Structures are given as structure tokens and as C-alpha cells.
Image (spheres, grey):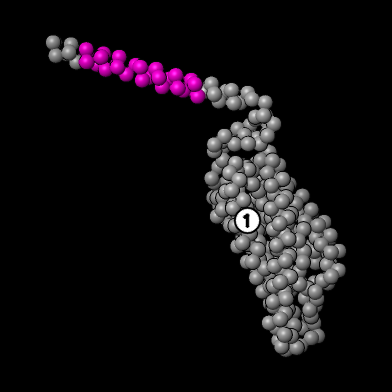
Amino acid sequence: MFKKKKIKEAKTQLNEALKPSEQLQIKDNQQEHFQEEVLLDQEHHHQVDHYHGVHHFDRYGNHDDVQATDFSLKKQFSHSRKSEIFRISIAAIILALSIGLSALDGLLEKFQVNIGGVIIEMRVFDILIIILAIPLTGLWYSMLIAMVEPWFHFLIDGDHSPIQIGFDSLGYLIAVLMFFFIFYGLFHNSPFHESPNKHQRRLKMWLPGLIIVPSLAVIFTLIFVLSLYLTFKSGYQNTNWNDFKKDGIGIFFAAFGIQAARFLVFYLLFALVQKKLKPINHRYR
């Protein structure tokens, strides 16, 4: 009996000793909550899209934490019926816009380089709108648009060979995958949020370009050369492939220079426009 009383007294003393620390913790929590409430009530909080640490708030005061899985491949398979209808609608709009911009690109190709019926592509705007729309349409619809859009350009501008348009579809598809897995996946660029760290934001924006621009330049140069070869071999043009083999190296580097300039302009436009689209992407996330 005496032993049980001693144990009870010890527990009472321990609880009393813990009370100040518990009260202190409660006080700290209340203080932190009060500070957050003050911060949320500040006038600027509802005027700008900004961060508090890793927590993101849009200009309307809506809280939206940064999600590391925004562009995981797994997430591309998990969509509700409502979001799927939305993506289909957006994809149709993006396809129409890309076709319209493709027609504009056709007007800008007055200074096109045509070798044996195969044109060194200099289109920028149609592929730009397709890449910019990846956050809204998702990977699969962006890939579909990338494969279909060059054929609409072919209907508008018949100067291209069908063989080249088929390879252009492949090239556009590769461009979508590169941006999805490199710009968004590898470098974790959010299409919805503006990172508060200016130095980190610049690195994440421009480092992918050092990979993407030369890679796409090489890929589309190879597409041009392969299209040229198959066009000649198919008899689509009455020109001898051997006539071009003599200057093959010069043609290759000339085509690469044009493609490098093309995708450099493309990436500069992408970097400028995608920043302006972040609030729109965030709103329709």
C-alpha cells in the first residue's frame, strides 16, 4: 500500500514538472499561429503570387504547397473524368493555335533553304505553343499534338515532302519528351510557381537550355539529312543523291547552324513566355 502511494506521488510530481514545458509549447504554437494570421492579413498577401518558405500563395490568397510530383510519369495516368475533359478541350484549342501559328511560320519561310525538295525547317511558333502547353494538356495529349500538327502544316504548305513531314512529327515528339523529362523532370522547374531564390531560378531556367538546344539542333539536322536521303532514294525528286554527297559535310554543318539558331530563338521565346504563363497554369491546375 505504501509502495503504491509512493509511485502515485512520483507520477504527480513528474506531471507537475512537465506542465511548464507543455504550457511553453502551447504558448509557442499560439504565437506562431498568431504570426501566420498577421501575415495572411497583410495587404500585399492578396496582391502578388509569392512564397513563405516552401509554401506557395497565389495572388488571390489561395494556399498551394509545392508538389515534387507535379511532373511524375505516374501522375500522368491519374486523372479524374472532369480533368480529362478539360485536357481534351485544351488540347483541341492548342492544336488549332499551333496550326494557325504554323501558317504564320509558312509565311516566314520565304527565305527557306530548299535542297532537292527537302526544306531546312525554320518553324518556331508552332512547336513553341505545343511545348508551352505541356503543363495544361499533359504529356500524352502534347505528344499527340506534336505528331499530328506537322501534317496540318503539310496541308497548308505543300512545298514539303511527305517523308520530311513524317520525320518532323518524330522530331516534335522528341522535343515534347525532352522538355517533360529534362526541363520539368530533371531540373524540377515548376510551371505553376516562381521560386523565391533568384540565383537558383536562373540556373534552373538556363541550364536545361544548354542540353536541349544543341540536342534538338543535332536531331533536326539528322532528320533533314535522313529525309533528304530517303526522298532521293524514293524517286520523289529527280535528283541524284551522289551529286550532294560531295558537299555532304558542308550541307550538314550549314543545316546544323540554321537549326541551332532556330532552337536558340525558340528557347529564348520559351523562357520569356513560360514565366508569364505561370499564373494561368496555376489557376487551371
Q: Quadrant of residue 35?
A: top right
Q: Is residue 90 left or right of residue 21?
A: right
Amino acid type, label 1: Trp
Q: Quadrant of the N terminus?
A: top left
Indicate yes or no whether the magenta region holds residue 78: no
Position of 184 relative to 168 (above/below): above
Magenta: main secondary structure: helix
Q: Residue at x 67, y 52 (%)?
A: 134
Q: Quadrant of the C terminus?
A: top right
Q: Is residue 87 visible?
A: no
Q: How many marks?
A: 1
Which residue is at the front of the view, 208 or 223? 208
Task: Tell me if mark 1 has few (under 14), some (14-19) or many (20+) residues whose alpha carbon lies within 10 angstroms of its own.
Answer: some
Position of 159 relative to 51 (above/below): below
Q: Picture coordinates of residue 158 (x, y %)?
A: 84, 70
Q: Residue at x 78, y 79 (%)?
A: 115
Q: Which residues are magenta?
A: 8-32
Position of 164 relative to 266 (above/below): below
Badge 1 is on which residue? 206
Q: Picture coordinates of residue 246 (x, y %)?
A: 71, 88
